[in-house]
Amino acid sequence: MEKPRNVFVIGPMGAGKTTVGKLLAEALGLEFVDTDREIERRTGADIAWIFDVEGEEGFRRREAAMLDELTARQGVLVATGGGAVIDEENRKRLISRGTVIYLDAPLEQQVERTSHDRNRPLLQSGEPREVLERLRDERDPLYREVADHVFTADRRSAKVLAGEIARVLREGQD
């Protein structure tokens, strides 16, 4: 059975899921949606505020509902939040509803890219490097469990990386 024509980009914060995802969606002719931005748009509140008011559990419920809705569409590229894979139902949806790209990033790059971002609630308590390392240890096996393809966001530009991913995905359709 052929997978639906959807692409889901997963990976840790700071990997470039949104930036690469937008370029990849354009290259593949898909609609781009970022789950975090869509949650913010619909609630009128930023993710940090949702975490403050509803806690991580409340945010994860919103995220799961959003992911269920978005992955049920056709012709979309969805960039997920870094923790979307924690929920088993989310993982099942990703696997069954499209092609999953795990965009990994070296820890140093994650630290560098997230160092000035105050809209990342999980990095507001504790040493960011330690938090990122712990999240990597917890989530990497889950990312790999659902991924059809793994790419590393290294020092290549987002455009070059998106082009490489698009080429691999097109070759898989031949």
Image (tube, rainbow, N blue to C red):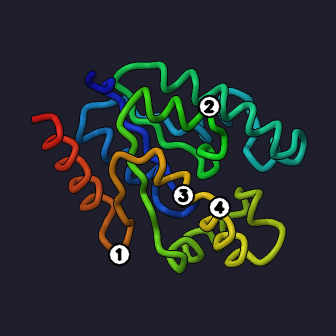
In-image side of 93 versus 126 (left or right): left
Provide residue 90's location: percent of width, then percent of height: 59, 34
The image shows residue 148 at horizontal and vertical percentages of: 35, 45
Of residue 68 and residue 86, the one placed in the foreground of this image is 86
Q: Secondary structure at mark 2?
A: helix
Query: Which quadrant of the view contains residue 8?
Result: top left
Whole-number angstrom distance, CA of label 4 to CA of label 1: 24 Å
Disc nearest the viewer among 2 and 1:
2
Tell me, for residue 141, which label it has, or none: 3
Count residues near mark 1 (Cα–Cα under 10 Å), then give few for <14, some for 14-19, many for 20+.
few
Name the amino acid, label 4: Glu
Q: Amino acid at mark 3?
A: Pro
The residue tagged 1 is: 155
Disc number for residue 123: none
Look at discs 1 and 3 and give the one toward the viewer.
3
Q: Which residue is mark 4?
A: 138
Instruction: Tell me the quarter of the image containing the N terminus.
Output: top left
Q: Which residue has dot 2 on it?
A: 89
| Left or right relative to 110: residue 160 | left
Cα gap from disc 2 to disc 1, whole angstroms: 33 Å
In the rendered image, the vertical position of residue 37 relative to residue 101, given as above or below: above
Mark 3 lies on a secondary structure that is helix
